[in-house]
Amino acid sequence: MIDSSDSGRKSNPARPGAEPPLEEARLRQQAIGVKLRHMFDEVVNEPVPDEFLEILRRGDQRKVDEDKA
């Protein structure tokens, strides 16, 4: 007696029910993108250190002084 219930189906015994590799890669890339955007948003919203602001002010003042001369 031959069981024909599985005839015509292709299966991957190593990874039953696995998604195609391209779909897995796309989902991985989306997850990475979400994490990167979250990390970037955190960095963008951090306050600028006072020391850095002072350096920028001094640079701006030098430019103003050079333009007057």
Image (cartoon, rainbow, N blue to C red):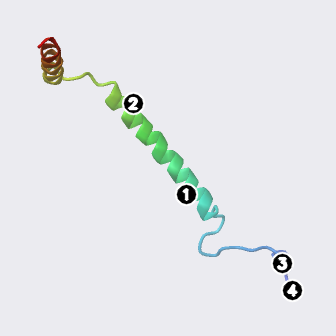
Q: Which residue is mark 3?
A: 7
Closest to the observer, 65 or 32? 65
Task: Give the percent coordinates (x, y) of residue 44.
Answer: 34, 28
Badge 3 element: loop
Q: Are marks 3 and 4 in contact (CB under 8 Å)?
A: no
Q: Amino acid at mark 4?
A: Ile
Q: Is residue 38 above or below residue 32?
A: above
Q: Identify the residue shown where x is 83% and y is 76%.
A: 8
Question: How far is disc 2 from disc 3 in space, using C-alphas?
Answer: 52 Å
> Which numbered disc flags the more N-terminal residue, 1 or 4?
4
Name the mark on residue 17.
none
Badge 1 element: helix
Q: Identify the residue shown where x is 57% and y is 58%.
A: 24
Kindly report which numbered mark, 3 or 4, lies closer to the viewer in this rendering.
3
Q: Which residue is mark 2?
A: 41
Task: Give the percent coordinates (x, y) of residue 65.
Answer: 12, 14
> Which numbered disc flags the more N-terminal residue, 2 or 3?
3
Q: Is residue 51 left or right of residue 11?
A: left
Name the mark on residue 25.
1
Q: Amino acid at mark 3?
A: Ser
Q: Quadrant of residue 69?
A: top left
